[in-house]
Image (spheres, helix red, strand yellow):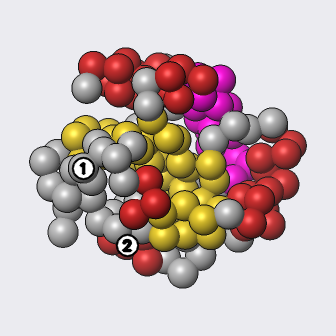
Amino acid sequence: MEITEGLPAPAFDMAADGGGRASLAALKGQTVVLFFYPKADTPACTTESQDFSALIDDFAGAGAVVIGVSRDPVKKLDRFKAKHDLKVILASDEPEDVTNAWGVWVQKKLYGREYMGIERATFLIDGDGVVRRVWRKVSVKGHAAEVLATVKSL
């Protein structure tokens, strides 16, 4: 099932950096920005996470929690977060349940080679658990600022 605007957000509960958890149920009543990225500590994923981190106070001021999701193990996420001084929550979907439920585990193509990987995508979820906005095939430059502007317009 493709996740589209107006649908209830699929539930998630994942291990997060620092030994924490990231769960939609625990965030009920809050706006959630859920961004999926292919792999921690790669150039575009680092830039995207840094851009969201740079705006974290603005997101918090608008009542939003920002969570980045990859299939990397938590230990790798902890190193990634510390290395780049990231301020967002980083969640690990090693079991693959969340990336599958959100429809972001897709066939990709690079230099003629096809493989499965995480589509860079962002979902904006309102306090009632409804998907309010979907960004697919995200281009990193300016994306965090665009998401913040959308959060503020809710």
Q: Position of residue 146 (x, y in %)?
A: 39, 21
Task: Say which amino acid is labelled 2.
Answer: Asn
Residue at image coords 55%, 69%: 14
Instruction: Let me know if residue 64 is in the magenta part.
Output: no
Does the magenta segment cover residue 42?
yes
Q: Main secondary structure of the magenta part?
A: helix
Q: CA distance from mark 2 to mark 1?
A: 22 Å
136 with respect to 113 (left or right):
left
Q: Nearer the viewer, residue 59 or 36?
A: 59
Along the line of sight, the residue nearer the viewer: 13 or 52: 13
Q: Is residue 99 above or below residue 8?
A: below
Q: Residue furthest bottom?
A: 95
Residue numbers of the magenta segment: 40-56
Note whether 20 is above or below 150 in the view shown: below
What number is the disc on residue 41?
none
On the question of residue 90 being in view, the answer is: yes
Residue 84: x percent and y percent? 81, 38
Task: Say what amino acid the circle numbered 1 marks.
Answer: Asp
Where's residue 3, x and y in %? 22, 57
Mark 2 surroundings within 10 Å by alpha-carbon count, few (fewer than 14), some (14 through 19), many (20 or more)? some
In the foreground, 69 or 118: 69
Q: Which mark is residue 100?
A: 2
Q: Image point 50% across, 41% down: which residue? A: 65
Numbered circle sitting on residue 128: 1
User: Which residue lies most toward the left here?
Assistant: 6
Q: Are marks 2 and 1 in contact (CB under 8 Å)?
A: no
Give the image quarter of residue 71. bottom right
Judge depth for marks 2 and 1 and give the one in front.
Answer: 1
| Left or right of residue 31: residue 70 | right
